């Protein structure tokens, strides 16, 4: 079972067009910062999307947030607790299977 201990959810509001996910994932890959899980849904009329990334809350997290905020298609980045997130419900569901 996956533990959510020492993990947080990065919530990014981004433009919704081809290539945005590649830019976001490329940022994390270049810095060898592992993403444990990803959820993406379009918002409103579909011009923007919300990306949720389950990541480790290590000493590099603040730097990753600052770097993500610099990406052209990223409007906002928030750090949220993993407890109570969609990921927690998914972990519980998949662990029961």
Image: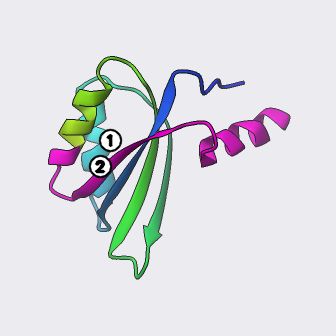
In the shown orientation, is residue 44 left or right of residue 1? left
Q: Residue at image x 26%, y 32%?
A: 64
C-alpha gap between disc 2 and disc 1: 5 Å
Picture quadrant of residue 17: bottom left
Hey, which residue is sitting farthest top in the picture? 59
**Relative to 49, residue 88 above or below:** above
Q: Nearer the viewer, residue 83 or 51?
A: 83
Residue 93 lies within the magenta run: yes
Question: In the rendered picture of this protein, how many numbered marks are placed on residues?
Answer: 2
Quadrant location of the C terminus?
top right
Extent of the magenta region: 69-97
Question: In the structure shown, which secondary structural element does the residue marked by tag 1 occupy?
Answer: helix
Provide residue 62's location: percent of width, then percent of height.
27, 29
Provide residue 1's location: percent of width, then percent of height.
72, 24
Badge 1 is on which residue? 25
Badge 2 is on which residue? 22
Q: Are marks 2 and 1 in contact (CB under 8 Å)?
A: yes
Q: Residue at image x 41%, y 59%?
A: 50
**Relative to 37, residue 50 above or below:** below
């Amino acid at each position: 079972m996956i533990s959510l201990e020492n993990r947080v959810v990065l919530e990014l509001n981004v433009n919704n067009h081809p290539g945005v996910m590649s830019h976001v994932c490329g940022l994390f890959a270049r810095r060898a910062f592992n993403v444990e899980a990803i959820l993406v849904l379009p918002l409103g009329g579909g011009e923007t999307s919300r990306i949720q990334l389950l990541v480790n809350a290590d000493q590099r997290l603040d730097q990753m947030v600052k770097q993500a905020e610099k990406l052209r298609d990223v409007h906002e980045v928030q750090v949220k607790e993993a407890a109570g997130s969609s990921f927690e419900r998914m972990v519980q569901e998949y662990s029961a299977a």
